[in-house]
Image (spheres, rainbow, N blue to C red):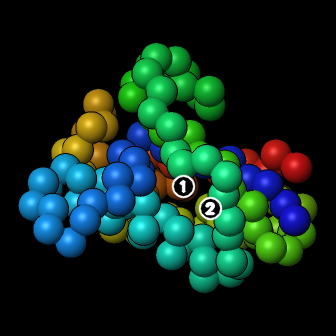
Amino acid sequence: MARYRIVTLVDITRSQPSRDTTDSTLLGQQANFNSLVQAIGMRSNVTWIQDPELHNGRLPIGPGKAAHWIWQFDAEREDVFLNQGDDVALLVNDLDGVPIVDQLNNTVELTPAVFRSQGDNINIWCSKIS
């Protein structure tokens, strides 16, 4: 199994709202997490030990400070996102443009309301950690 790390400015809190929940923030957070898992799941089944965690302050990738979420997951197969020597190239490509719910607990404007893993205004970074 291979382990990957996601760092994102998008609120991907796994809030697990009940069917009766009407809180739009909780519903949006879960929707973002679900969209992320489904996009990753196009190539591999994923498992994880710990839900995404909110961090404030300096980003671990690139310059700047902002609220960001860090999440680690395992893919069922090695090199499932490998392309031309880049361990996460296919994952980066798959995530770019996936719609999100914005204006949750993120501290930066996310326009357009999508995961951006390439080009300008990147808001999600992927790396293989083992």
Would you say 127 lies left or right of 8 here?
Answer: right
Tag 1: amino acid:
Gln
Q: Residue at x 53, y 74 (%)?
A: 39
Residue placed at 29% from the left, 31% from the top?
107
Callout 2 secondary element: helix
Q: Nearer the viewer, residue 69 or 62?
A: 69
Q: Is residue 83 among what the camera can see?
A: no
Label 1 crowd bin: few (<14), some (14–19), many (20+), radius 10 Å = some
Instruction: Give the residue at the far left of this rendering.
Output: 22
Left or right of 85 in this view: 80: left
Residue 37 in view: yes
Q: Secondary structure at mark 1?
A: loop
Q: Position of residue 41 (x, y in %)?
A: 60, 77
Indicate left or right for 95 with 110 as reference: right
Please tell me which residue lies in front, 105 or 94.
105
- Classify residue 28 as left or right of residue 65: left
What is the x, y in percent for residue 34? 42, 68
The residue type indicated by label 2 comes to Val
Residue drawn at point x = 61 percent, y = 47 percent: 50
- The residue that label 2 is drawn on is 92
22 above or below 128?
below
* Residue 12 position within the rendered picture, expressed as x and y whole percent measured from the top left: 41, 51
**Residue wearing tag 1:** 118
Depth-wise, is mark 1 or mark 2 nearer the camera?
2
Upstream in the sequence, badge 1 or badge 2? 2
Which label number is shown at residue 57?
none
Q: Are marks 1 and 2 in contact (CB under 8 Å)?
A: yes
Rendered location of residue 118, percent (x, y): 54, 55
